[in-house]
Amino acid sequence: MAKTKSNGANGGKKSAKAGPTTTVGNGGEWHQQAQDSALTTNQGLPISDNQNSLRASARGPTLLEDFILREKITHFDHERIPERIVHARGTGVHGFFELTESLSAYTRAKILTEVGEQTPLFARFSTVAGGAGSIDTPRDVRGFAVKMYTKEGNWDLVGNNIPVFFIQDAIKFPDLVHAVKMEPDRGFPQAATAHDTFWDFISLTPESLHMIMWAMSDRTLPRSLRMIEGFGVHSFRLINDAGQSTFVKFHWRPKLGLQSTIWDEACKIAGGDPDYHRRDMFEAVSNGDFPEWELAVQLFTEEQADGFPFDHLDATKLIPEELVPLKVIGRMVLNRWPNNFFAETEQVAFCPSHIVPGIDFSNDPLLQGRLFSYLDTQLSRLGSANFHQIPINAPKCPFANHQRDGHMQMSQPVGRVNYEPNSLSADGPRETPAGFRSMAAQESGSRGRIRAESFSDHYSQARQFFVSQTVLEQAHMASALVFELSKVEHPHIRAAVVGHLRHIDAGLAQRVATGLGMAALPELPPTTVAVQDFAPSPALQIIGKMKDTLEGRAVGVLVADGSDRATVDALTAAIKKAGAAFKIIAPHVGEVALSDQSMLKVDGQLAGTPSVMFDAVALVLSAQAGADLAKEAAAVDFVRDAFGHLKAIAADGGAQALLDKAGVAKDDGVVDAGDTGKFVKAAKTRQWAREPSVRTLT
Ligand code: HDE
């Protein structure tokens, strides 16, 4: 049994306490109760033997009397709670939100009006389709959920890294999720959209086409969770002191810029490190390299919204930044790894209905459904209406009401009054004028199961997204569609999807049809409204939004016995100076003896640390090591993949044999290891110009 409990990454500082501790939740505060070092049962009984169960004789049967064994095993048997039906695989981190610009003209929410105030928060990033143990890098939307413990109660902004959604009405969510999850008869594929049931549903649900364009783009292959954008997706309302409402969309923008991987790279990362994103976040936070995002808002009035060529209440639509610019109002910094994965990341319960005075919901029918769903799901996952008492979920401001009792009740209210109004408890909780008020919005029209006509245009923004991309990003989307649909067994489903693509972009439809070996383009499905040509929005690109920086990135330096010390030192110093991390990779772990006989510590063994783990690589090898490694598949793949994934490669003369074997031709991104300046510059980006030489893009 581990006798030391480490807090892991804790504000960049490691703290370790000797002796076991138990943690008891109490109104959101953690109380560390250090005990003496005796191992005990849950009832506090000291245990003298934790190695052997109670037996009738040395080789005899185990006795039912062994209550210590039974307590331990029973607890173990109940360790798991139901995983989230969607977003099961996630990574959580603590941090804070700091307001830099007040929105007091628009809202009375303290978190959006008190400049400089730091509000503690817990953020959880997730994939959607896979189970809790699935890989980190499938092609999938990423959840971006932030629970802010404000002075006026918890505000949960439960968003995604894509600003639109697949469906318009909550009633379709169970169908969408059933279609995307493992097929029910066979139990696969896990964490993948590339299968018949998903595309069948999509082909029959044209409103999903805009989201499909995003899902097939490189947005769903992030390089790091630290390099994704986050979106509240729905329109919300801000309400000011005078009760006036302004619509708002929330955007998180990563300080490190947006960056994605390449599909082949994402697949190989899945094999090389299934926990790639979780580890990346853990390492960044542990190293004090705290991930940061700006919070920006798009503010618009009802009158403005009436003039948009789409309905902002339809979650399959976004508001282009060119139409309503983003206003940056604050920042989020993630600076503390959770103490315990289960207690925090697994038990955190986000609910879009957790809101604060001064913010309100819009009529978006998807949001309206979510307001019900999340509370309901928490009751089933956490098993009790008292889930808000679990420390990660408890508000950090005072909270009081007359709700009582229930499963696993932790608080012990005193007194005889548990109702309101009452005359017996003068200082008991009462309604307050500062409390939450719903916007007094006027509603009119006939009741019914109706889809608004303003929700009928399913293709214009899908087209706008496609035409806004760079040529390479468009090619990636076409390849993604070919890959996904090539996994679909039913030809009629493939044809139906390509039919929809014809409404989006004729060239795209043709490329996908060709990639799928279709003799002719399928029929154009009917539309109720004409597809509009919206102006391209460059803000929707990724390549165009990559930052010219190596900060937060990692470089792999491949060495072996005999590598030149001066070259290794110069390279690693330049990488460090550029704000990146580096790892020394060698044919074996331990140490290598460099050219001057000095020893260098190795961080990763070659076969276990492929180049997909890095943003750029450097090869510093003696001629002998270069020749030896040219016969080693792991080394050849290391170089070939770095080249194919468009990464900068620095190589010295000794690495030439390896470069030749990997088929690496000189280009702007393949530089001399001695030219550290050129290498760092090349490493800051992907070598996009190389792509046509390594991949068919038409
Ligand atoms: Fe969710 N969603 N969702 N969702 N969602 C859940 O809640 C649901 C939707 C999102 O890290 C569940 O606690 C419905 C949109 C995130 O714990 C569940 C509808 C967006 C997370 C649920 C949607 C999201 C969830 C599963 C359609 C982006 C993970 C477990 C009306 C704005 C939060 C849970 C975390 C999780 C329901 C649509 C984002 C079942 C019914 C749109 C980031 O309640």
Image: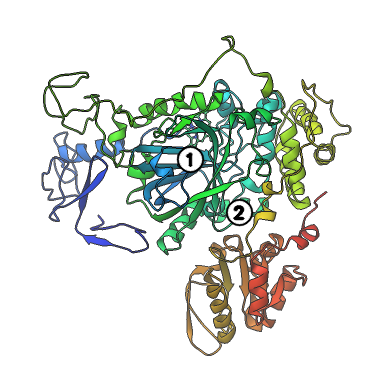
The residue under label 2 is which amino acid type?
Leu
**Which residue corresponds to the image point at 36% horizontal and 60% vertical from the top-left?**
11
Residue 406, placed above or below residue 164: above
Nearer to me, 92 or 52: 92
Which residue has dot 2 on it? 258
* Residue 697 shown left or right of residue 217 in the figure: right
Residue 198, image x, y percentages = 64, 30
**Residue at the limit of the structure toward the bottom, as seen here:** 596
Residue 181, placed above or below residue 608: above
Nearer to me, 181 or 183: 181
Determine whether the beta carbon of the residue marked 1 sits less than 8 angstroms from the nearest atom of ligand 1. no
Which residue has dot 1 on it? 105
Secondary structure under tag 1 reads loop
Nearer to me, 696 or 467: 467
* Residue 13 shown left or right of residue 237 in the figure: left
Sequence-wise first label, 1 or 2? 1
Secondary structure under tag 2 reads loop
Residue 132, image x, y percentages = 46, 40
Q: Which mark is residue 184?
A: none
Question: Which is closer to the viewer, label 1 or label 2?
Answer: 1
The residue under label 1 is which amino acid type?
Ala
Question: Which quarter of the rendered picture does the N terminus lie within?
Answer: bottom left
